[in-house]
Structures are given as C-alpha cells and as structure tokens.
Image (spheres, grey):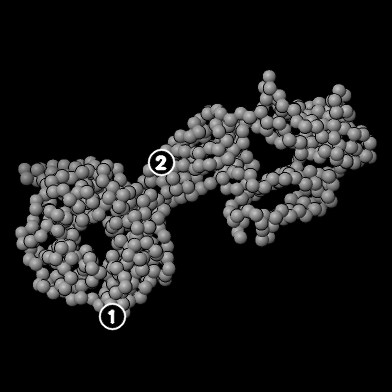
C-alpha cells in the first residue's frame, strides 16, 4: 500500500513540475524588493529588503519568516558557505550566520569596520563580501570573523561588483574599470582594455570565462581581459542587474527588460519573459525543478528549468505592406510580427516573384527587430517581399511571399539612347529609355520627320530596350519618341530626339565579357568585344535599395576600360548593375574608405 501511494505522489509531482510553461507568480511574502534569492538544502530563501528573510520548503507555494536573531529588516543579500548560511544587511548590522538552515541567526563578531553589506561572493570555503562603501572583506572561517582585503590602489574608484575564483579577485567599478588581483589584493591590474565604459553592475566568473554585466550590456573575456567582446545579440534591454549560471545556461536579469538566457556562452540571448508582470529583475536562483526570480517591486515567480532550451522558431507573419496592397507610398516601412526565439531577421524585396538575382533590390540580413524602415521604391511598380527568422544555428525560416503595388504616377519616359543629335554608321541600332513602372506597353516610333506622319518603326514592347535593324537607311535624319501606354485612357509621350545615319555597316557578333575590380574608391570595368557605339548603362544601389549612382556611356573600341569614381560615397555594402541591350552583369561589393 505504501509503495502505491509513493508512486502516485511521484507521478503527481512530475506532472505538477512540468505543467507550467510560463512564469508562475508566487505569493506569501511581504511587499518589498526581493534583493536576493538562493536555494539551499531543498529550501528557497528570499531576502526582502524592509521585511527580512522568508523561507519556503515547498518550492515557493508557502512562505514563513525566519528572522530569529536578525535585528534588522534591511537585509540585502544571502549566500551559503558549506552548510553555513550568511545574510548581509545594508544598514550598520553587518553579517548574520545560521548553522541550522536559517531557524536561528547569530551576528558575526564585530570585525567588520564597514557594515553596510552589498553582496557576497564565494570561492570554495572562503567567502568575500563587498560593502556599499567599496570595501572588500573575506572570511576563512565560514563568516565567523572577517579580514579586510587591501584595495588602496582602488581608492579613486567606486567598487560596484566583485567575483572570486581560485584565490583571484575581480572588482568592477562605476566607471567601467575592471581590476584583477592574483595575490589577495596586494596588487591590482586594470583589465578592461579600453572596451568597457558603462557601470559594472554584476560579474560571473565561470572557469576561464568572465561575464561582465553593465548598464550597457554584456562583455565577455576568456583570457583575463586581454580581449573583450560584446555579447548582446538578442538583448532588447542592455541594463543588466544580475547574471547567474543556471545548470548549463547563462541567465541574466535586466532593470526593465525581464529575463534572458543563453546556451552558447552569451553569443545569443533568448527572451524568457512569458508571464512576468514586473520586468525589473534583481535576483535569480534555481533548484532541480524550478528557476526562481525576484523583482524590484516585490514580486516572486518560478518556472520549470526544462523550459531553458533552444526555441524552435516559426516563420514570420508579415504585417506591412499587406499582401495585395495598392497605392503604397514610395517610402516603405516594412514590418512583421516578432518571432519568439529568433536572433535576427533577413528581408528580401524583389521586382519579380522568383526573386532572381537580377530582380532583387533589397537583401538585408542581421536585422535585430521586426521593422525595416525607409526603403525608397519607385512608383507604378509591383514588388514582392519576404522575411526569414534566423535561429540560434543561423538557419532561416521564411515567411510566405507578399506583393504590393506602389502609388501611381503618370511618368514620362526619359530617352537615353540614341542621344539627341547622335550620329551612327552601325546597324542594328539600340533604342533605350527609362522604366516608368507598371503599364500596358511602350510604343517606340521612329520617323523621318518630327511630326511622325511617316513612320519607319512603329513597335510596341514591354521592355525598355529595343534593337532595330530594318527601315533605317544611309545618310538620313530620323526622329524618335516613346509613348507609355498606362491604360485605355491614359498615355504619356516622351520628348523627341533625333539621330543621323551615315554609311551603315552591319555589326558582327563576338563573345562579350565584362570584367570588373574595385581599386581604392574606383570601380573599374573592362569591356571585351563590345562594338563601337554600343550604349552601356550602369546603376549602383546601396544596401536599402536606394539608387546612389546612375549613368550611361558608349563603348569606343573592342576593348574599353571605364572607371567610375565612388569617392563621394560613404563606406558600405553596394550592388552594381551594368547592362546593354543584350548583356547584363551585376554584383555586390564592399566599399571601405
């Protein structure tokens, strides 16, 4: 019978512990800052500033006060050294000790010359404490007596956090300076290496790895400060209040952004706030079943430790522009719903739904929020876009494809080639004009008079380039124009250009090549086998799809070198497109100045 009851209880306990996917609020303590938490001997201890110490023996369901012998309510921190519990007060009471799980407390002998305790740090059987007046003490007898650690080298600094490991001491300061002592405070070395400038609020020393929590994010070093790296990917709020090791995870609390965890040494952080109402986290502890958090405004919560895992991300849901939208303004702020667990996003905007390389106008990865603003687009266009959520392994999960059309403007085609008053002796002749966007068709007209009564070419096309080899005669002057036919009732006609022919010859095809290289700020193109009088257009766009350089020129020989000076462009990632009537090349390049 007893065996049956025990088995049922274990099954109930397993189900109970795993039933909470979000943070579960806990009640039963007095209102006040939950400034510190620990778990010890199957109990949870909560330090509530202004109320004292509360203890739970049932994973936070019920709490009792255990302050017998503690003569102040202004307790600030708690730790254990072996089987001894220590509580620090931040008035003038100093340290209290308990050897019976907190039922009874005895004040430490009066060897603390500064008694306003800020926090503890434990190194094996040795415990250190930092006072609110920047004095460090240590105890080698489980908190019975205390010896002051020499910090005279740091007298000009306010010490705000300490950590200890194998006899070494770290002391973080309000100026972002971080000092290391390897000889119990006799000497101190500043190891911040000019990387940290924010106030250091907390430290975690995990083996060779140092995590430095500041008001400006997390800094990491694995070589005692020779190199520091910012590790803030995924953090929405960088004001760090506490950082703890929770099993194989690093977990941190922030002043206004709740809780985050990392399973890859801080390289990526995942928000962990489902169910939290008070986002100002001051304390974190854990046991075999739960993680516990305490907040600045007196709330406690717990969550299953099994929830600390890499999230499986979902595809983003696109929000703006909505699918099928018409009349979208030319400056677009792309938006989508936030994806839980995503460490970043990747957006692609294209002129066709196949997202072919030549049609992509925006391709941006590493976006840290759910908005990509101020993308400048052209009117009368249909665009396609999609967004991928990026997971911790840098795998991408793509959204569905949305399309939209930008606002209508009746644009007049701009004639590019042949130039006005151009003279040619070659056939075929390439006609090239600007793209005005969505329309029914373009109509190219070529005539021998500017009233266009006698047309030698009258062709409709959807393209902006057309090659003409028939109807053009020697030693003639011709006039040409392009009409943009938007619909049955609206057409816009370009200006009129003229060109003159001499004795016309026929071009012979050769294998064409366009080679390119970037030298300093000059983009150099090498055109091989591009015949005389071949029009070439080029465009350079920045990373958000804005056209920053546009122009055209005519190749002058079978091998032609062209330089485009990018001196006026800032450093960044760009894409160029170079094309003729029958040849096109594009590529991304990085300009560094």
What is the distance, in whole Å, between disc 1 and disc 2 at their CAs? 51 Å
* Residue at disc 2, secondary structure: loop
Q: Position of residue 76 (x, y in %)?
A: 18, 59
User: Where in the figure is residue 338, as x and y percent of width and height?
Assistant: 41, 41
Q: Position of residue 420 (x, y in %)?
A: 82, 38
Q: Is residue 155 visible?
A: yes
Tell me if residue 554 comes above or below residue 491 in the rendering.
Answer: below
Q: Is residue 208 above or below residue 508?
A: below
Q: Residue furthest top?
A: 488
Residue of label 2:
338
Q: Is residue 83 visible?
A: no
Position of 151 compared to 505: left or right? left
Give me the residue at 50% from left, 42% from top. Answer: 373
Quadrant showing the N terminus: top left
Which residue matches tag 1? 186
The quadrant holding residue 166 is bottom left
Instruction: Establish if 74 lies above or below 448.
Output: below
């Amino acid at each position: 019978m007893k065996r049956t009851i025990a088995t049922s209880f274990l099954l109930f306990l397993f189900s109970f512990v795993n039933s909470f996917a979000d943070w579960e609020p806990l009640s039963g303590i007095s209102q006040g800052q939950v400034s510190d938490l620990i778990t010890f001997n199957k109990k949870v201890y909560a330090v509530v500033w202004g109320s004292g110490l509360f203890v739970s023996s049932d994973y936070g369901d019920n709490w009792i006060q255990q302050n017998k012998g503690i003569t102040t309510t202004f307790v600030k921190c708690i730790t254990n050294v072996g089987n001894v519990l220590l509580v620090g007060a931040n008035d003038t009471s100093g340290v209290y000790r308990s050897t019976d799980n907190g039922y009874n407390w005895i004040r430490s002998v009066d060897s603390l010359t500064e008694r306003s305790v800020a926090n503890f740090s434990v190194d094996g059987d040795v415990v250190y404490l930092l006072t609110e007046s920047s004095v460090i003490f240590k105890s080698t007898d489980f908190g019975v007596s205390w010896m002051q650690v020499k910090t005279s080298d740091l007298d000009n600094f306010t010490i705000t956090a300490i950590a200890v490991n194998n006899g070494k001491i770290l002391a973080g300061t309000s100026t972002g300076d971080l000092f290391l002592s390897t000889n119990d405070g006799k000497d101190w070395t500043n190891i911040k290496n000019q990387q940290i400038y924010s106030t250091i609020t907390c430290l975690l020393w995990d083996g060779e790895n140092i995590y430095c929590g500041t008001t400006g994010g997390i800094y990491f070093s694995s070589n005692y400060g020779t190199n520091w790296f910012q590790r803030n990917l995924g953090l929405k709020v960088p004001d760090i209040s506490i950082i703890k090791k929770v099993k194989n995870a690093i977990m941190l609390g922030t002043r206004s952004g709740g809780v985050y965890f990392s399973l890859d040494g801080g390289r990526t952080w995942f928000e962990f706030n489902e169910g939290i109402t008070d986002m100002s986290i001051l304390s974190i502890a854990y046991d075999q079943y739960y993680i516990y958090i305490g907040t600045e405004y007196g709330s406690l919560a717990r969550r299953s430790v099994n929830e600390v895992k890499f999230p499986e991300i979902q595809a983003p849901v696109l929000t703006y522009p909505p699918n099928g939208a018409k009349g979208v303004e030319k400056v677009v702020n792309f938006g989508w719903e936030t994806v839980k667990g995503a460490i970043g996003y990747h957006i692609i905007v294209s002129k066709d739904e196949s997202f072919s390389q030549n049609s992509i106008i925006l391709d941006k990865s590493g976006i840290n929020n759910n908005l990509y603003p101020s993308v400048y687009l052209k009117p009368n266009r249909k665009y396609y876009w999609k967004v991928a959520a990026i997971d911790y392994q840098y795998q991408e999960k793509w959204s569905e494809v949305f399309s939209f059309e930008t606002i209508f403007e009746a644009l007049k085609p701009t004639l590019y080639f042949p130039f006005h008053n151009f003279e040619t002796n070659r056939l075929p002749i390439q006609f090239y004009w600007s793209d005005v966007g969505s329309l029914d068709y373009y109509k190219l007209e070529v005539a021998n008079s500017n009233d266009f009564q006698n047309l030698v070419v009258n062709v409709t096309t959807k393209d902006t380039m057309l090659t003409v080899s028939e109807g053009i005669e020697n030693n003639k002057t011709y006039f040409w124009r392009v009409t943009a036919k938007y619909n049955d009732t609206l057409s816009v006609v370009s200006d009129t250009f003229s060109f003159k022919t001499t004795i016309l010859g026929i071009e012979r095809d050769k294998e064409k090549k366009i080679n390119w290289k970037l030298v300093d700020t000059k983009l150099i193109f090498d055109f091989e086998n591009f015949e005389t009088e071949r029009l070439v257009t080029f465009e350079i766009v920045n990373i958000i799809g804005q056209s920053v350089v546009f122009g055209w020129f005519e190749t002058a020989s079978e091998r032609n070198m062209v330089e485009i000076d990018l001196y006026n462009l800032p450093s960044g990632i760009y894409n160029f497109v170079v094309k003729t009537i029958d040849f096109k090349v594009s590529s991304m390049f990085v300009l560094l100045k």
